Amino acid sequence: MQLRMTNQREMILQELKKSKDHLTADELYERVKKKMPRISLATVYRNLEILSEAGMIGKLEVSGRQKRFDWDTGEHDHIHCIQCHRVDNLNLNRKELGLLSSETIKGYRISGYRLEFSGVCSQCLKKNRK
Amino acid sequence: MQLRMTNQREMILQELKKSKDHLTADELYERVKKKMPRISLATVYRNLEILSEAGMIGKLEVSGRQKRFDWDTGEHDHIHCIQCHRVDNLNLNRKELGLLSSETIKGYRISGYRLEFSGVCSQCLKKNRK
DNA sequence: CCTTTTTTAGGAATAATTACCAATACTATG
DNA sequence: CATAGTATTGGTAATTATTCCTAAAAAAGG
């Protein structure tokens, strides 16, 4: 692992953790820029990739949209709103699902899975009622 | 519903069904172009969107990559190769999972879910051994 | 310090997709 | 059938998200 923490890298990581949210690269770029005005968007992208590679953050590639990055690296699933595209955490009992038991399916060597619910979040439901 | 079938629309639908695969818009464009050389890529994109809207094909927004379209509209899950990005079908017993039972989770009104395994497909495993 | 390696900023390049719009094709009437 | 209205198409420009490139800056290691 042994990941060298540069100022930019550290700042990106801290801002993501502070947000306690699932931010996109450019959302994070906007936040980091407030403190480091000269940082480049490419640096944000590169470091998010490096940090997720190192397992220090999670990467969410959800529903064909922009990638989002997750400060929480613990095992959990996600649920997202098909209207405003927010992503929330979800804790399902994975053992009960019994899905991870098999190491190969249809000839694939399984490395992981993603369970992704979609629907309309409470904020959007409220908005729609108006 | 009542979808008017233009020549282009029909051709796109037929080529996708014929392929029995999960094609991207540009893969399909290449195939359709063989029979309709003057068709536009935009038309392919547009009609794939319209067809999936009408429920005549499925849309797969998988792992942050290119969208793929599915000739098979029956309920099924997917498994994809993290190496070559192919997508295969998977039939899991959904009732057993007991996941669709709840209509709301964390305030969301659930409209669906996607279970997506990832791993290395047999072709890639074979390739790697060489 | 001086040299080597890594990282950065900034902009250019790329890939996938969508938007726009003038030209066509189709539909339904009179 | 002529024709007016609507839908769809082709071609291209624009957009979005992301990666690539390169010279400069920063850090590491003698």
Image (cartoon, coloured by chain):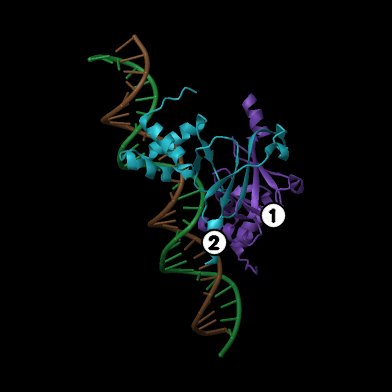
Chain colours: A cyan, B purple, C green, D brown
Residue A98 at x, y percent in the picture = 73, 37
Amino acid under disc 1: Thr
Tell which of D24 and B23 is nearer to you: D24
Q: How many labels does the image show?
A: 2
Q: In which quarter of the image is residue B126?
A: top right
**Mark 1 crowdedness (10 Å alpha carbons): few <14, some 14-19, many ≥20:** few
Say what secondary structure mark 1 lies in.
loop
Q: Is residue A29 left or right of residue A129?
A: left
Per the model, the C-alpha gap separating discs 2 and 1 is 32 Å
Residue labelled with disc 2? A126
Q: Which residue is drawn at 76% across and 49% down?
A: B95
Residue B22 at x, y percent in the picture = 64, 47
Residue C6 at x, y percent in the picture = 39, 24
Is residue B37 visible to us here? no
Q: In this view, does B106 lie above or below D25?
A: below
Say what secondary structure mark 2 lies in.
helix
Q: Is residue A4 left or right of residue B73?
A: left
Amino acid under disc 2: Lys
Q: Name the mark nearer the viewer: 2 or 1.
A: 2
Q: In which quarter of the image is residue A7?
A: top left
Q: In this view, does A9 lie above or below A118?
A: above
Residue B90 at x, y percent in the picture = 71, 43
Tell which of B57 and D11 is nearer to you: B57
Numbered label attached to residue A33: none
Tell which of B75 and B84 is nearer to you: B75
Q: In which quarter of the image is residue A82?
A: bottom right
Using the image, name the chain to which the residue with label 2 belongs: A
Residue labelled with disc 1? B73
